[in-house]
Amino acid sequence: MNKIAPKSLLHSKWTKTHINNKEKHFSVVSISFDEDQRVVECVIQAVINHNEYMIDWRELKDSSQWKIGWK
């Protein structure tokens, strides 16, 4: 399990373990918090083609799907 602090997500880099559409490396480009400082929206962007995807930030904790950094 990847350890993640929600406040340090913005601009973090990730590598997807199962590649789709040649998209392997991603960067978190947008995070929205509610009034209680809980993450309500997380947007990642593929480095190769700049496609953006809204994901549940907790998915990044799954080390079978995501690795921290670009590897």
Image (cartoon, grey):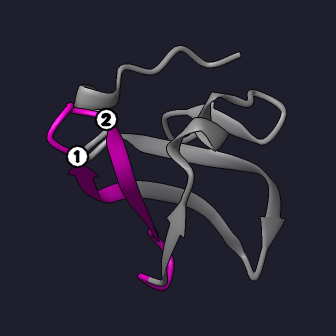
Residue 44, compared with residue 68, is above or below; it is: below
Q: Is residue 27 left or right of residue 68?
A: left
Distance from Cα at disc 2 to Cα at disc 1: 5 Å
Q: Is residue 45 magenta?
A: yes
Q: Amino acid at mark 1?
A: Phe
Mark 2: few/some/many CA within 10 Å (<14, 14-19, 20+) = few
Residue 28, compared with residue 44, is above or below; it is: above
Q: Please state the horizontal and vertical placement of residue 43, each as a whole percent of the image.
A: 40, 64
Q: Chief secondary structure of the magenta span?
A: strand
Residue placed under numbered mark 1 in the picture? 33
Residue placed under numbered mark 2 in the picture? 38
The single residue placed furthest to the left in the displayed view is: 35
Quadrant of the rendering where the N terminus is positioned: top right
Residue at position x 21%, y 32% in the image: 37
Numbered circle sitting on residue 18: none
Q: Please state the horizontal and vertical placement of residue 24, each as a whole percent of the image.
A: 66, 61
* Of 20 and 31, the residue lying toward us: 31
* Of 2 and 22, the residue lying toward us: 2
Q: Amino acid at mark 2?
A: Arg
Residue at position x 63%, y 28% in the image: 61
Q: Give the residues in magenta.
A: 28-50
In terms of sequence position, does the residue under pointer 2 or pointer 1 come before the other?
1
Q: Is residue 26 left or right of residue 61?
A: left
Residue at position x 68%, y 39% in the image: 66
* Of 6 and 50, the residue lying toward us: 6
**2 and 1 marks in contact (CB < 8 Å):** yes
Label 2 residue SS: loop
